[in-house]
Image (cartoon, rainbow, N blue to C red):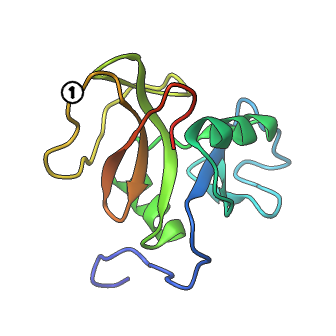
């Protein structure tokens, strides 16, 4: 919008959604920046917001079946794009500290150079919080169980 706020659509079905992206090295595009529906082009990648309630692991698996991965947010512009797609809902993103508690990595192995944590987060716990979702304008941690992030 002209005042600098991201567009927010609020009439989505309820539930937690999955935001996947396809890297231009994995996804074959006809033209630079071309993405076939329902994928949305942004910054050389193709994004798709899945509107099904899934665990973090199931969301990542669904993305990988499509040739992509959970979204990585590298800067404020990426975050604004993601927020514009999800409105006020929450979606899983690829940021996690499953490998080493307190050291966050993106599932696509890109460098973690930008974060926008909810106030007071992340907290270092006994390994129970590993998966990250984005909600509104901040990152949040979701609890991790022995099998899956819920």
Q: Which of 12 and 125 lies nearest the eye of the viewer?
A: 125
User: Seen from this angle, which residue lies furthest top?
Assistant: 100
Give x and y (percent) for residue 3: 27, 83
Towards the viewer: 65 or 54: 54
Residue name at image x 61 percent, y 53 percent: 18
In the rendered image, residue 106, in percent from the top left (x then y), is placed at: 47, 29
- Name the residue at 15% across, 51% down: 119
Q: Eyeballing the image, is 140 above or below 9?
A: above
Residue at image mark 1: 124
Q: What residue appears at the point 57 percent right and 66 percent down from the top-left corner?
A: 15
Q: Is residue 76 visible?
A: yes
Single out the residue that lies furthest toward the right.
Answer: 30
Up/down of 134 relative to 74, above or below: below
Lateral position of residue 73 relative to residue 53, left or right:
left
Question: Which image quarter is the N terminus in?
Answer: bottom left
What residue occupies the far left of the structure in this picture? 120
Q: Quadrant of residue 71?
A: top right
Q: Residue at the spot x=31%, y=18% of the render?
A: 101
Q: Position of residue 8 (x, y in %)?
A: 45, 79
Q: Secondary structure at mark 1?
A: loop
Q: Count the labels in the image.
A: 1
Image quarter of residue 39: bottom right
Q: Is residue 125 left or right of residue 44?
A: left
């Amino acid at each position: 919008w002209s005042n600098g706020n991201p567009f927010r659509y609020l009439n989505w079905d309820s539930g937690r959604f999955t935001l996947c992206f396809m890297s231009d090295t994995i996804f074959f595009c006809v033209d630079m920046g071309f993405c076939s529906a329902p994928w949305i082009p942004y910054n050389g990648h193709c994004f798709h917001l899945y509107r099904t309630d899934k665990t973090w692991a199931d969301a990542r698996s669904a993305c990988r079946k499509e040739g992509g991965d959970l979204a990585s947010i590298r800067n404020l512009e990426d975050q604004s794009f993601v927020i514009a797609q999800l409105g006020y809902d929450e979606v899983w993103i690829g940021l996690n500290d499953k490998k080493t508690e307190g050291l966050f990595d993106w599932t696509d192995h890109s460098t973690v150079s930008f974060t926008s944590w909810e106030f007071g987060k992340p907290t270092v716990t006994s390994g129970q919080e590993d998966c990250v979702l984005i909600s509104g304008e901040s990152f949040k941690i979701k609890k991790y169980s022995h099998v899956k992030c819920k």
